[in-house]
Structures are given as C-alpha cells and as structure tokens.
Image (cartoon, rainbow, N blue to C red):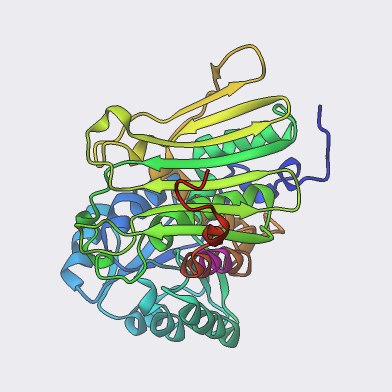
Amino acid sequence: MIESPDRPEFAPDPGYRPILPSRPRPIVIIGAGGIVRDAHLPAYRKAGYPVAGIVDVAIDRARDLADRYRIDRTHGSVTEAVAAAPDDVIFDCAVMPEHYVQVLSALPDGAAVLLQKPIGNNWSDTLAIMDVIRSKGLIAAVNTQLRFAPYVTVAREAIARGEIGELYDLEVVVEVNTPWEYFPAVLGLDRLELNMHSIHHLDLIRSFVGDPESVSCSTVRHPTKQHANSRSAIVLHYDRPLRAIVCTNHDHRFGPDHEQSFIKWEGTDGAIRAQMGVLMDYPQGRADRLEINTGDGWRPLPFDGSWFPDAFMYSMGVLQRHLTGELRTLPTAVSDVFATMAVLEAGYTANDRGGVRPDYDACPDPGDY
C-alpha cells in the first residue's frame, strides 16, 4: 500500500524510461580518454548513435579511437571540430573539469552539450562553469549515468508502482579496493572520493527522493597513500522519516571475499537490493544482481545490461529525445545536477566543521564513581 502518494519516488520523470531516440542527432566527442573508449563509444555504437567526430589535443589517441569505431573526422582542437560539425550536433564533453570553461567557451552559442560529473573540482569552479553555460545559452545536460543503470531503472519502476511501499531507508555501500592508479588524471586532485565516486551515489539518491535539507559528512584519506580522500560517510537529512546514507571505503585491500558494492531501498512493504558488480574486484568485476523482498523472501528482479555501457546510451538518449521533441522534460539538465554539486560542497563543508564535540568536560574523572 502506498502511504504517501506525493513522495517523489512514486512519480519519476518520464525521461528515466529506457527509450532510445527515434531520430538521433550526430555527436562530436571532445576528449579521447579511457572513459570514452570503454563506455561512451561502446554505448553509442550499441544504440546506433552517429558519431560525426572526435577531438583530442593528443591527436593520435583520437585517431586510434576513430579507426576502431569508424569515425570519419578527428580534430586536434575544439575550434577545428566546431567548424566541421553538423548544424544539429550534440557535443559530448568528456574532459577533466578544469578544462570545462575553455571548452564550453569555444562552442557556438545555443549549442547542445553533454557534460560529465563533477561540474567543477570545487564550488567556485562550478559557478564559473555555470556562468559560461548561461552566457552562451547552451542546452546542457550532465551524464548522470548511474540514474540509467539497468538495475536502477527496474528498481525505479518497481518503487513507482508501490511494490515496496513508502521508502524509509536508502543506502549505498561500497567497500572495495579501487586502483586509482588506473586513472592517473585524478591522483593529483585535492578532492578525490566525493568528486570522482560518491557523486554518482549522491546524485542517484536525489533522483529518487529529491533534495536533502542538510548534509553530514566525514571524508578521509588513507594514512599511507599520497592521493586525497578515499573513504567517506555521508548522511543526507530529509524532512521525512527517511535515512539516506552513502558509505564508501576504496582501501579494502584484503581480497574479494568481503568486498561489497550495493544500493538498497527499504520501504514499508518490502526492500530492493542491487549489487553493482563493476566496482568489485576491479577491473575484472563481478555480476550485477537485483533482488526484491516483499515479505516472502528474496527473489531476483530481471533486467538486461549493465552500468557500463548501457547506462550511457540512455544518459545521452534523454538529451537526444528532449532536443528532438520526443521528451518534454530533461531530468539531467545542468540546472538539476547543479543541486548535486551543492550537496557535494555541503559535504566538504560539513567535513571541515568536524561534527559536534561531546561535552567531555561534564564527564566525571576516572575513579570518581
């Protein structure tokens, strides 16, 4: 039984339905790094999206991917790519956030663009990026691809139907050994875990239950590693009886037996649990799983595909459908994901404040009692 039908989880945006655009626009990809190789291009090929060109200052890297995926044009600069781009192009901006202002400034006014998370390495960067988007009138969405992972889509549909009742607990737990050295571009960042990992989970929670009223957070680095924070505990506070928490430990280097990586939704009438296998025993990964329990034991919920690359099809697809008029809404608009960045920044602020100190001065001395 649905106790509170006005809850946002009961009315998800229609953009989350796994529908591909009927008239996909051509795409020019800016950046030819690993995520483009391993996720964007496989997803676009699977979906049948036309890729008109690929850009990278390391032109040989762009040419390698162009040869592999039969892309006609390669470019060494954004300016060159813009000059050769079709009129109805979507720019897929897959560069590090510190390059966003420069890249976005080079795009035509009113252009359509898909950005990656995070929108900036810190709050001032985010504000500067948003200023460029506004001043140029860009139609900007963000690749919030975990929102479109196949197991998340099925869970979202089941929750919207009221199969587990009203949500009262939403938890994301990741305890794995993440080889950050596979991603050398992030190793020198001042902010690592929240920006490059937990942002997925915070954004996912927002997509289900909306914006939190406040945020508590502890995020810390490993004592023997040189890179920045790699473990976090984040609590999102809502004005309803809902616990929403993200707990991550990327330093669990003690073998795969006790690794875990899951999303769990608990409601008044049941629970759903999704295992995100790609994060476990990385890069080999484990199987994804989706299960539901409505009082008669756990049973599998069927789904097709995985986070990589399938979610990337629909993250680009929702922007495509919006631009062609097939979808009125755009749930991944940069204006929405801006709130995810606000949650992220609130997490760092909460971490810096350090929580509430217990009143140890009022405690009795040892031996007084």
**Rendering coords of residue 118 (x, y %):** 45, 66
| 124 over 91 or under it: above or below | below
Image label count: 0
Residue at image point 83% right, 34% down: 3
- Is 247 on the left-hand or right-hand side of 323? left
- Residue 139: say if magenta: no
Quarter the N terminus occupies = top right
Query: Which one is in front, 282 or 41?
Result: 282
Query: Residues in magenta?
Result: 341-347
Question: Foreground residue, 196 or 350?
Answer: 350
Q: Which residue of the protein is positioned furthest toward the front in this rendering?
A: 368
Res 267 seen here: yes
Q: Is residue 345 magenta?
A: yes
Q: Is residue 143 left or right of residue 286?
A: right
**Residue 23 in sight:** no
**Of 273 and 251, the residue lying toward us:** 251
Q: Position of residue 172 (x, y in %)?
A: 50, 42
Q: In the rendered view, would you say 78 is above or below 167?
A: below
Residue placed at 63% from the left, 38% from the top? 169
Q: Main secondary structure of the magenta part?
A: helix
Q: Residue at 61% x, 66% y: name it.
A: 339
Residue drawn 42% across the image and 63% down it: 195
Q: Residue 155 occupies which quadrant of the picture?
A: top right
